[in-house]
Amino acid sequence: QVHPVESGGGSVQAGGSLRLSCEDSGSGNVISCLAWFRQSPGKEREGVAFIDSDETTSYPDSVKGRFAISRDNAKNTLYLQMNDLKPEDTAMYYCAASLQFCGIQTLGPPGAGTFDYWGQGTQVTVSS
């Protein structure tokens, strides 16, 4: 089983940075496609960063150039470096995992339904 566990959320002022981590506490998992999603009250869950097993990444325009996703397969850990944070980045952030290759390079970023495993979320709050 895959058990993603997020950490690293918190409160920062606009312009600040945070680094989120997501560790798979399960054992023997070969995770292919990973992503970070976020959701704030009254809004739909939004994908903000994706990384496939071939290291292809994808970001929506809202975070491109400010967020960077990376993975350390040896540590079973996914990261999200968030710089130049804005109040509109305030949300609960979730990591998501799939054992299947997403094909981001040819198909574009997948939707939330692609991912079978989700963490419990970590809150990010950005004040102006």
Image (cartoon, rainbow, N blue to C red):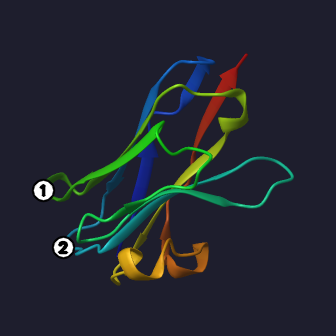
Q: Position of residue 42 (x, y in %)?
A: 87, 52
Give the SS element for disc 1. helix
**Above or below — where is 116 with respect to 47?**
below
Q: Which residue is mark 1?
A: 74
Q: Position of residue 44 (x, y in %)?
A: 77, 61
Question: Quadrant where the C terminus lies?
Answer: top right
- Residue at (49, 55) in percent of width and height: 59
Q: Nearer the viewer, mark 1 or mark 2?
A: 1
Q: Identify residue type, mark 2.
A: Gly
Q: Earlier in the sequence, mark 1 or mark 2?
A: 2
Q: Estimate the spatial distance between the alpha carbons at disc 1 and disc 2, rounded to whole Å.
A: 11 Å
The answer to whether any part of residue 27 appears in the image is yes
Q: Is residue 8 left or right of residue 70?
A: right
Q: Quadrant of residue 56?
A: bottom left
Q: Position of residue 102 (x, y in %)?
A: 39, 80
Q: Position of residue 70 (x, y in %)?
A: 30, 50
Residue projecting furthest to the right: 42
Residue projecting furthest to the left: 74
Q: Residues within 10 Å of mark 1 (few under 14, many from 20)?
A: few
Q: Is residue 70 left or right of residue 121?
A: left
Please tell me which residue lies in front, 61 or 54: 61
Q: Is residue 88 left or right of residue 83?
A: right
Please tell me which residue lies in front, 98 or 102: 102
Give the SS element for disc 2. loop
- Residue at (59, 72) in percent of width and height: 112
Question: Quadrant where the N terminus lies?
Answer: bottom left
Q: Identify residue type, mark 1.
A: Ala
